[in-house]
Amino acid sequence: MALALVARWQRFWIRRRLPAPRRFRYERFGGIVQLRYPQALVFVDRARARSLGYDAPPPGLWPDTPQPADEAADGAPADAGTLHDSTRPLSAPLEAHLQLTNRCSAGCRGCYTGATSEGGPHEWGLQQWQAALDELAAAGVFHVALGGGESAELPWLGELLRHARARGLVPNLTTSGLYDDAVLERLCDWAGQGLFGQINISLDGVGADYAAVRGFDGFARADRALVALRAVHKNVGINCVLTQRSFAGLPALFAHARRRRLSEVELLRFKPAGRGARRDTYESLRCTDAQHRQLLPTALQLSRRHRVRVRVDCSFTPMLTHHKPPPELLSFLAVYGCAGGDLLVAARAGGQLAACSFAPPENTATTALRQYFHSAAAFSPFRSWPAAQEPCRSCSYLALCRGGCRVVSAHVSGDARAPDPECPRVLDYRASRPGPDPVHNVPVSQKGDAESMTQRASRQLKVLG
């Protein structure tokens, strides 16, 4: 007991000596504040930014900011505008998802990067990724999400973590947990030093559900990593890629997260990328329309029952807005649809920028982020959502949802600019028109009674109704 207390005290003082993360970034509407407790990025207007002591924006960013004598009676600038006009990208991404390597020997059948034990050609090394972190920090990025492949096995990961911290970036990690004791011990040491913000283990189900989704039985090894990392770091959670099989296993997954005293469960939509883009794989694993409509009430119910925070990735936003929650609540909770090329960017193992982890890479290196981010041709078609087709154009949630997942649209419809073909509103819109349903080439008569499914889900939704 005494040794455990000494170890905790040592970890506490090690973390106290870490460089402080970025606290604030100026934006045209005001700025973004990074809170530590609770952990959050908060958008504030110009008046609030000044009240916090941030009153020296870069030249030209607040060109119409009135002088103090011209402010309104309540202290707010008379023409400060509204918070974050989402039709215009931010000055820089909030976070960057870095695929440090495409080397992984697990061989999961739905791997979105198509990782192999040999890795990919021309993968970047430590010095190149350090240069990329320098560029991200200079641009104003707050967080970097590190993944792979399996980046935990990289011998230089610890050096990269310390470099990120020294630049004011908060590094988070997604890992499979499927490695030997030496790698896990090293990872626990870095976690104990406080080098990570959040660590999530990929766990697509409990017990047999894990094997059914991944194609092999790795649950015990992944759970072993969960236990070891949670013993030295409080911000440890689960990443669960939702599939037809894992959806039914969500109650067991949330119960497991509570038993392990985890900080969160993050639910991810299965994407048609990497090995997951194979037609038979995608069709057999993607969630059904009925499951998509049940997602929000199911997640809320399980989060309340087990007192575990639940997060959903941006591609699930059409399934959330389907239940008509107040838009201002979604905005307050920072619930946005496809954020690729705006709130987030990604980088491949060879350093190429991409709009998100699942999108095709751009012909630009991450070390040129600032120049590319503000170019007119950057991240098309991810930024083209304001010109959305129907039924997105007339949807009151368009500015939040942004037309759904571009990667799913490109795979299913052949057009990345098309409305998300698995969005309930899109399915209902197309079902009301004669002819075959173009989504997955399934006749509308086989889709089931969409209206009755919506009514059943709405009756279960009590928090946001």
Image: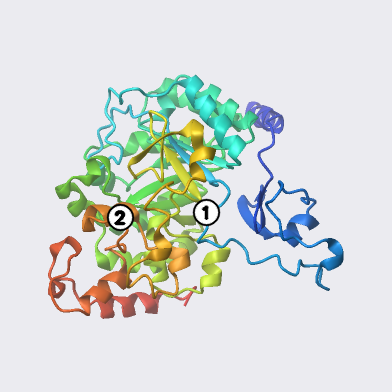
Q: Is residue 369 visible?
A: yes
Q: With respect to residue 15, does 260 lie above or below?
A: below
Looking at the picture, tell me which residue is in the foreground, 208 or 294: 294
Residue 232, horizontal then vertical, whole percent:
56, 34
Image-quadrant location for residue 14: top right
Residue type indicated by callout 1: Pro
Residue at 52% over, 58% down: 88
Q: Secondary structure at mark 2?
A: loop
Assess disc 1: are there few (<14), some (14-19) or many (≥20) residues with their C-alpha within 10 Å of its C-alpha: some
Looking at the picture, tell me which residue is in the foreground, 1 or 94: 94
Q: Secondary structure at mark 1?
A: loop
Q: Which mark is drawn over residue 89?
A: 1
Q: With respect to residue 49, does 222 lie above or below?
A: above
Looking at the picture, tell me which residue is in the foreground, 424 or 26: 26
Looking at the picture, tell me which residue is in the foreground, 148 or 83: 83
Badge 1 or badge 2: first in the primary sequence: 1
Residue at 80% over, 57% down: 51
Residue 106, horizontal then vertical, whole percent:
28, 31
Q: Is residue 236 visible?
A: no
Residue at 36% over, 61% down: 404
Residue type indicated by callout 2: Ala
Q: Which mark is drawn over residue 416?
A: 2
